[in-house]
Amino acid sequence: MIEYNDKHLEEIQYLEEIINLLKYKLDIETSNLEEQKIDLIAARKEMWENTTHSSADFDKLSDLNQYLSALQAQTFTYTELAKRISKYEKMLDSPYFARIDFTEQGYDDTDKIYIGLFNLMDEETHDIKVYDWRAPISSVYYRNELGPVEYKAPAGIIKGTITLKRQYKITKGEMEYFFDSNINILDEMLMEALSQNMTSKMKTIVETIQKQQDLIIRDLENDLLVVQGVAGSGKSSVALHRIAFLMYQGLNYKLSANNIIVISPNPLFSKYISNVLPELGEDNINEFTFENIFFKLYESRLSVKTKSENFENIICAATEEERNFLRSYNEFKGSKTFKEILDRFVYYFEHKMIKFEDVYFNGEFLETKQLLKSFLLSGKLNMPTAKKLKIMENRIIEKLHERKLSRRSKIEKAVVKLNQHEFESKSFTRMLAAKETASFIKNLHNFTEFDCFELYKTLFENRKIFNAVSKGLILPENIEKIINYTNQSLQDRYNIPYADGMGLVYLKIKAEGCDLFRDIKQVVVDEAQDYYPLHYHILKNLYRDARFTVVGDVNQSVEKKSDVSIYDDIIEIFGFEKNNKVFLNKSYRSSYEISKFSSKLLEEGTYTEYFKRNEEEPEIIQCKTTDELDNKLIKDIENYKSQGLNTVAIICKNRKTAADLYFRIAGRTKVKLVDYLEEQSITGTIIVPVYLAKGLEFDAVMVYGTDNKTYNTDYDKKLLYIACTRALHRLSLYYTGKITRYLK
């Protein structure tokens, strides 16, 4: 007890020292920030008063550029200062959460390494008082027990011994408790973190990162990292913490927020994860869906249905036959076979579809059609078709400019003969010459420009072309139906099916190229199991200079059958020599009872471990009528609220069911409808389709309509598994009629 009191006193004193240091730094930095703000406002005012406001005033433009350069430097300094202040303010609440005592090999002194969200240095002594969780030495805390250890630092491998591992609970700058541990992260610490109620945003996990998670986060060796993680394994959170780690390494790898992108399944998930990086002290990054990529490439000329709409269409299909057709349609349009067809089609277009014409101007040939075609097909230019055609066009226009003066002279002579007024003749000549040039370029565009949407339509409308580019490939048995459905669907350019939208994206990249994302160096792909090979070929071609982190769970695919072989396909598509495939088989999200209950819905032989956090058993509730079920739902919602459960989700199989339920009960209890038509937060009680709940988690989940008619197929079984595994603390399932056969 005396020994503990001595330790406690020592820790209290160190905490006080750190808090005082933080307050001192905050006082100085806050004062500096105010001075910087005054200087910045003055500099902007000075620029406004002393520089030109017109681009025509060329003499003063150089002065403006000088002011702008100085302002940018001042603004950057101000922004970085504000970020430091924000970090210090966060640290005041809880400056660190762990400590290791480390003795480096060959040295006698033992260093006390305190680990927190951010670095903290004493400027006078140059001692690091708190190490950032991403610092090389911090990896020792996450990966090792007491005894001999080693870690990788910029100077090489550092070896030594850990003699102490200590964890802290500090709240509002006050020490609540601490304890020493001889395992990676003591179960009690993890238990407490997992027992807390949810907020509307994903939380950081720096205090409870597990060894295998840390290995993923700190991987710098592989160009492609593929993670298969069971529901609740923390794979999405790990991917985001990996981004924060890579940004921490930014000086070495020249990586900043605008060099990283997350491919997100839907806007709701993007909003849910948007808080993680700012909490870790990093700028937020771009989050794109594949639909966003489509709109980036085609802008307002076309519109595509969302992936969520695609899920809804499949789930709500009137018959199983229609449902199976829609799945086969998506499967074909996302397949390696269709990718090969599009590649062949681009080649076919270059060789057989471009109708070159002889080009002449002012009575002489500029280019013959034979020479133009030979230039295109010569193989000298390794670039997309559109770029090659643009080079040809520019070459022809250069020849046109060389002959425009002589042509204008001819026109002017002809005009003068018709009209004796010299002044009018000159202006009339310029107008005629301009019209002639415009007409020339318009004719030139007949074979130097093309429309990818019209090209894509031609692929399916012209059976001769489709047969030619698909020759020798194994096509689906229902290919005729797929082609007819495609032709019908493409009549409306503002309501293009999601699968065709992805085909159009790939065609545009291959035929025209895309340089919109050349700055991207790191790509994170979430919900990997729901994408087809074509999606990954799009990413490979779009982000040509990037490294990839791909995370998913084959047990949670919605529209297609998936197994772990999809990860081998992904590795093959990207073709990186340095790649790694990692499995996270331990689930931390749900209570042990909910996890065991949900495991009944997994395929036989699926290996999953569960963190043992005991709470109430899930409930299965039968009601005689829909009205009785609605009443029971409302009563249980109020019960969950009274227990302090912050987030409650009523998960329905599809949007239609969710909307119907919402309009029945919205006047009787406070509830929100969340769907793909608008962005919503997940605070309070929500009603949500199951495919939008993927990746999210809630204190309590109420699965609506678990009867045998609603959940009857193997695909339905996966949807039910997704719904059940969203729950942290409470799970209840409601039905009328007969219970689904998967829960008997």
Image: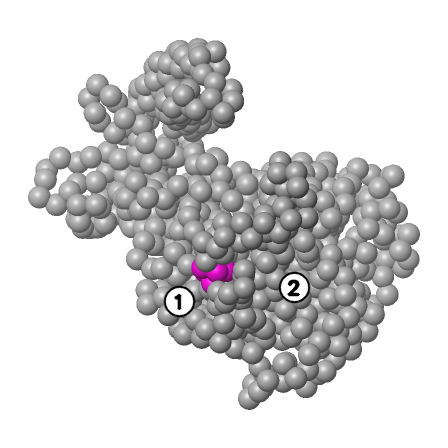
Question: In the image, residue 597 lies at what x, y percent?
Answer: 63, 61
Residue in the image at 60% along x and 41% along y? 426
Residue nearest the viewer, comparing 177 with 650? 650
Range shown magenta: 391-397
Is residue 393 within the magenta segment? yes
| Quadrant position of the C terminus in the picture | bottom right
Residue 470 drawn above or below residue 544: below
Residue nearest the viewer, comparing 741 with 48? 48
Say if mark 1 contacts mark 2, CB within 8 Å: no
| Quadrant position of the N terminus in the picture | top left
Q: Quadrant of residue 733?
A: bottom right
Residue 570 drawn above or below residue 295: below
**Type of amino acid under label 2:** Phe
Label ID, residue 144: none
Residue linked to disc 1: 381
Is residue 349 visible to us here?
yes
Q: Quadrant of residue 419?
A: top right
State the residue lying farthest toward the bottom.
472
Residue nearest the viewer, comparing 375 with 556? 375
Q: Main secondary structure of the magenta part?
A: helix
In the image, 620: left or right of 452?
right
- The structure's colour scheme is one colour
Residue in the image at 83% along x and 47% along y? 662
Sequence-earlier tag: 1 or 2: 1
Question: In the image, residue 457 lies at what x, y percent?
Answer: 68, 70
Residue linked to disc 2: 453
Question: In the image, residue 536 lies at what x, y percent?
Answer: 50, 65
Residue in the image at 8% along x and 43% along y? 106
In the image, 86: left or right of 491?
left
Question: Element at badge 2?
Answer: helix
